[in-house]
Amino acid sequence: MSHPIIHHNHEHHHEDFQLKDTHPLLGERWPAMGGVRGNDKLTSTYDLVEQMYYLYVRVVKAKDLPPNPLTGSCDPYVQVKLGNYKGTTRHLEKRPNPEWNQVFAFSKDRVQSSTLEVYVKDKEMVGRDDYMGKVVFDLNEVPTRVPPDSPLAPQWYRLEDPRRADGVKVRGEIMVAVWIGTQADEAFPDAWHSDAASVHGEGVASARSKVYVSPKLWYLRVNVIEAQDVQPATRGRTPEVFVKAQVGNQVLKTRTSVSATLNPKWNEDLLFVVAEPFEEQLVLHVEDHVSARKDDLLGRVTLPLTMFEKRLDHRPFVHSRWFDLEKFGIPALEGETRRELRFASRIHLRVCLEGAYHVMDESTMYISDTRPTARQLWRPPVGVLEVGILGAKQLLPMKNRDGRGTTDAYCVAKYGQKWVRTRTLVGTFSPSWNEQYTWEVYDPSTVITIGVFDNCHLDGNGNSTRDSRIGKVRIRLSTLETDRVYTHSYPLIVLTPSGVKKMGEVQLAVRFTCLSVASMLHLYSQPLLPKMHYLHPFTVSQLDSLRYQAMSIVAARLGRTEPALRKEVVEYMLDVESHLWSMRRSKANFFRVMSLLSGLVGIFSWLGEVCKWKNPATTVLVHILLLILVWYPELILPTVFLYMFFIGLWNFRSRPRHPPHMDTKLSWAEAASPDELDEEFDTFPTSKQQDLVYMRYDRLRSVAGRIQTVVGDMATQGERLGSLLSWRDPRATCLFVVFCLLAAVALYVTPFRVVALVTGLYLLRHPRFRSKLPPLPVNFFRRLPSKIDSML
């Protein structure tokens, strides 16, 4: 009785990590409801999200406000009240004619009042704030603004006495605009939202939606050619000179010059990542390696990045230049102040900003942009990507507030240089963002990444806490059909030290529109990256280092925006830790390879069954096919391609109907042991106890030993093949040479069709004519020598 229950639970657990179809009511429609006027009108904007109604209040300014009779001044601010929700502007000191220009957005789904009250108050330093006046609006009379109408013009309203209900006017006027709209309104991103009414102070900015643009990145190539008249600090000593170059936090060194001369030469390239605007400088230090612990500074030069040429191709020649070196700390003349002393030493450089490369800040496996840095080298876009971020469901509590678990979720999407961030919805496990964003697509073989995070900075903590990861989704554009709307609920899966965990689901609507079918199909014949990556490629170590520097620059620049896109968010979206060792990931990649080889193994297994006559009818058909192909060899290639054509047509019926998503089984996340997960989440360098590190090191040695054995076996087979003609085994080589001579004569005399037919019939012979012993060629090959005998 227990087995069906276990099986049912396993199926339920597996389905919990699957993609789910959703059927949201997408598109903007303006029904006649409540205070909304008009007929059913469909609009083309925001057609991938569910429409959400908001009551917008724009408080522009006030005039002729009366001064406080006690202080003789006026420190006004405005409070907008709708039912239990209250929004407040900033207060302005000693301003009888203040200007605020702030917008308040109240979700219409949560409105329980029929009137809107706008109060003007005077900020009191001691005691309760004083009411100066109010304006009341009937929600049934509020107009509706339907895009693309122009913004509603604000109007002046006389203030009423807030202490009386008969509408007696008092001194002062306020300029206000009130209308009903949707999230498509341009006032929506910067408005104060009733959904975040509990957020105050600096936390308000971190709750708003924003669009960010990554800084424009360049590769800086510094070719250090040579130096002249380098004088060591110790006279009579031949210096061991090297050059240390620094741009911001990036430091690179050339090799030490091996020539015993005062004019060392290197001709070595140093590569950096820099971002516009060019705030850093290139600082070059010429140093003498005196000992293992001491390097003497012989000279220095500081160069602004704006002085260097921008190279857009591999052909234009960048001119080299000489720069004088400066040495510091030497007094010029007795009695004068210490100053810089310029001397005859100089350095020869060729420096340029490479505009024909794409600066990679993310892995090439799921790259979102392949364009070169220089805009003049960009191709026109081939499509448009539209993403509607509808909401999330079943989110888990991420922190405690007032003694209970809560989540303040927001969503970040990254494609190309454009990042988007939705507003933060406070205290809900089922947030509904319903925000839509658009990107231009220059290459369909790219990936958009969408992540969900918990906002931990609504109370203005600054840098003391980190936003928590809830999960992310990747969608490859080439897997999407054009002009089709995909509406799915994606599982948000994260790996924790305790195992794989589903944090909830995010609901998306995605549409990829093609602008030019011919241009898109042409891209499939082009290199993925710009040409310079193939004409003058970087080494693997250079690419890893440059990618890390690019990610650091992007994280630093986006962290300086308002609201800041924090470092931990950028690093999670860019997969900064994807290169670190993981036993789980290694197993997953191994089984991916085995899955690929399983098809090849299946073909050989089927051929083995044919050769053993397991199914006589199939074997007879293979014999007939062999006779046809041997008699008409010109049909071999057409038959192969026609067979693949029919396989493609057959598989079209079972083609994937939805985008790919995070697969826990493929990632080997469900089968990972606790110790493997603990190792994966360890810091680098390790912070674990010595005994645990020893155990993991021995385990890694065991795994590496098995890999070493497989690699050694592959090398052995290759060396045996090479020893056929090397006379390392003179008898074996003699036999093989004689066999080659006889085979050449026999193949020259015998027609090819006969040879192919005899070979095929021999391989397909009946089992009664087979022996269980290895065949003669295998026996001969296994006796050949290899270099394994010379291994220590």
Image (tube, helix red, strand yellow):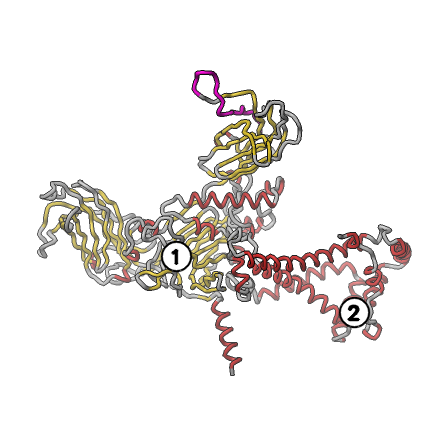
Q: Residue at x 23, y 60 (%)?
A: 35
SS at circle 1:
strand
Q: Is residue 148 visible?
A: no
Label 1 CA crowd tier, 10 Å (few <14, some 14–19, many 20+): many
Q: Which residues are magenta?
A: 318-337
**Percent x, y of residue 624:** 78, 69
Left or right, 402 with respect to 512, comes to: left
Between 659 and 694, the one lying in front of the other is: 694
The residue shown at (56%, 63%) is: 668
Q: Position of residue 319 (x, y in %)?
A: 58, 27
The kind of residue on which mark 1 rests is Asp
Does the image show residue 345?
Answer: yes
Which residue is more in the foreground, 95 or 769?
Answer: 95
Residue that badge 2 annotates: 623
- State the residue position of label 1: 454
Disc 2 to disc 1: CB gap under 8 Å: no
Q: Earlier in the sequence, mark 2 or mark 1?
A: 1
Q: Nearer the viewer, residue 588 or 528?
A: 588
Vertical placement of 783 versus 254: above or below?
Answer: below
Q: Is residue 725 magenta?
A: no
Point out the frontmost of discs 2 and 1: 1
Q: What main secondary structure does the magenta stretch of the protein show?
A: loop
Q: Give the answer, above or below, for where 435 lies relative to 15.
A: above
The one of 193 and 378 positioned closer to us in this rendering: 193
* Magenta-colored stretch includes residue 334: yes
Other-residue count near label 2 (Cα within 10 Å), few / some / many at <14 / 14–19 / ≥20: some
Residue extending farthest to the bottom is: 1
Q: Amino acid at mark 2?
A: His
Residue 14, given in percent of the width and then of the height, sits at: 50, 70
In whole angstroms, how far apart are the C-alphas of marks 2 and 1?
65 Å
